Image (cartoon, coloured by chain):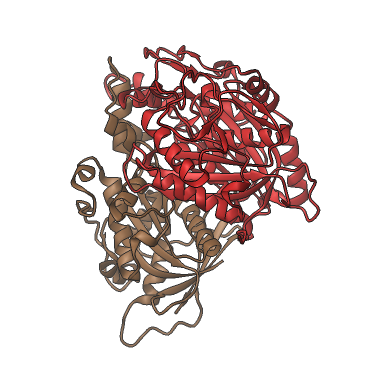
Chain colours: A brown, B red
Amino acid sequence: MRISIEGIGVLGPGLNGWPASQAILAGAAPWADTAVVIPPGDLLPPAERRRTGPPVKLALAVGCEAIAQSQRNAADLPAVFASSAGDGDNMHYIFDMLSRNGREVSPTRFHNSVHNAPSGYWSIATKSMAPTMSLACFDASFAAGLIEAATQTLASGNAVVLIAYDTPYPQPLHATRPINAALGVALVLAGNQTNRSLAELEISIVRAGTASTPIANAGLETLRLGIPTARSLPLLTALAALTLNTEPAPEKISPDRIYLDYIAGNQLEVVAHPC
Amino acid sequence: MERNHLYPLQLSAFTLSTPLGAGLSATFGALRAGRTGLKRCDFLDVDLDTCIGRIDGLEQMPVHAGLAAYDCRNNRLAQLGLEQDNFTGAVGFARLRYGRERIGVFLGTSTSGILDSELAYRQRNPETGALPKSFNYAGSHNCYSVADYVQQVLGLAGPAMVVSTACSSSAKVFGTAARMIQAGLCDAAVVGGVDSLCLTTLYGFNSLELVSSRPCRPFDADRDGISIGEAAGFVLLERAASKTDPDSIMLLGVGESSDAYHMSTPHPEGAGAQLAIQAALAAAGLTAGDIDYINLHGTGTKSNDAAEDKAVFNVFGGSTPCSSTKGATGHLLGAAGVSEAIISALCIRNGFMPGGLNTQRLDSALNSNYLLHNREQPVSRVLSNSFGFGGSNCSLVLGRPGQ
């Protein structure tokens, strides 16, 4: 599958937006493990904003960043949401209430418990009636999301925004499923190259038995292994290297070939070409 | 009208287990007999005044040998479903034909195996708060667990994922499968949905005052909420053969949309639902007049039925026969989409339109042609609606080939 990338959003530890993260991911600036500050979700109507937790605001923030860069209108774009676990804080609260007498689950907590809560809030915030997808594939959720978004783009010819996000579970669930920090990554995918294209990706499912591509920076590599969405970081480092505005422009002899772990002995092979 | 290049796809094999029974003949026999699978809630220690569609025997059922790490109510239900109607045999044949890595697994669920987490929270260590050692997150609670389990039981190794968009989940998997096959990432796909009873949905829907104390009564003037059920349904989807058997059932189109209105209340004019219906018809290259029967989402809540009625009436007018089968099965949540797609396939295969159960007095404010009695007559094409929380809408068109 060949698709082009028109916008990138990222928010996570030491990765505060794409412009600030580009040099870090390309290895031209140091990475520091700073806390993630998730913006308040100004796009949401006040009633909805009050009812949402970090995953919704994280998804909204990275999705908006990627779409702004693509200069497209969010209301026109189908959206694919990929997350391993959804809203862990909210699930913890519900399970805790269900273990107590009375079992009084709050209605808002309940409707926020669906895996597609961020996509529901997204469509309200962006006033988009385009289809949204919410999927899960454990540690390979980003890879599955990239496949879904790419096949959507190819099937319809329309641009699609992919929004991958994870936030940590609180204890005691954290002990059974450690997700080390919040991280969101968004990409705007389009079928054909336009003057807005930042890079072109060639994506295939392979059974090469190749190890997943690591990241040279030890801190970022720890991040990659500690958050399912961070399995996307090798792709983001390749995109950063391709798109970083340095003088003189780096000579690219061969395209970057990246392997992301997928499932059942498959890898996702992604070749990033400059535009 | 030009048909979308993704369709048609053939439903080469399918199976369904619901509160009406395990396997296609149990479900269809009950629909034809007008028998409901709903009864007073007897699930664990739930103290709600409601009716549920519980599948008997899951409490004692084993999961597949060698996959004990996936043991939970949801995967037991998946196992029960896979064992019916020689479905695994049909997948085995496809595996020989295409290769195990060329068949995808795309399943819908809303709550996966979270019942295990609910029960584990009752057994937290009083000092440390830790969950019991027997709790296995990845095999039960995690959203992907059921697709992982089913892929292994069926001996497949292609693309897989779980779609979790509340009550539209296992309708939307049909669209994913069509796109995956079109992109050449697989040659066939097992699509479906598995959703099982848990406390979160029972107490959660109750907190929203959306649960009826009686068996749900879709489109009734006095309807007052849903009855929650559980089910497992699976379909083997393949590209249509060049020479298709005229008795085959085909997926003719999928339409998806978002309400962009509210998290738990549908758009009052049914605007999102209407978009999904129109997109499904457009994908199939059909017009409203080509549809013989509509299997409604028809949950039995005031707002859902009113919104869906407006959407259906705006597209079809008041003549196309329609009904909800949730009076028989209950609301199957993440398994509703595939269950009702399979019921639609059975309607086509058997020339049958099910009358909606439990409904005594049709709401005069609703204008669609809601069936209260079964009809036996040829059915060539069916529209099946599934709408979920978050304003997630999906409509499917199924029918005979080449018409």
Total labels drawn: 0
Residue A206's place in the image compared with A249, above or below, is above
Question: What residue appears at the point 69 percent right and 42 percent down from the top-left corner?
Answer: B380
Image coordinates of residue B372 in percent, x first then y, are 56, 24
Q: Residue A32 placed where, x, y %?
A: 24, 61
| Left or right of B399, for residue B179 | left
Taking A47 as reference, is A28 above or below it? below
Q: Nearer the viewer, residue B349 or B337?
A: B349
Q: Is residue A223 left or right of residue B325?
A: left
Location of residue A84 by image quarter: top left
Q: Position of residue B2 (x, y in %)?
A: 61, 61
Q: Nearer the viewer, residue B77 or A191?
A: A191
Residue A138 visible? The answer is no
The answer to whether A114 appears left or right of B191 in the picture is left
Q: Is residue A256 above or below residue A107?
A: below
Q: Residue at x 47, y 65 (%)?
A: A158
- Which percent across, then down, holds residue B326? 52, 26
Q: Residue furthest bottom?
A: A248
Q: In which quadrant of the rendered view does residue A251 lie?
A: bottom left
| Residue at image location 71% in from the left, 34% down from the top | B87
Q: Quadrant of the N terminus of chain B?
A: bottom right
Q: Is B271 in front, or is A251?
A: B271
Instruction: Reply above or below: B206 against B400.
Output: above
> Is residue A55 among what the camera can see?
yes
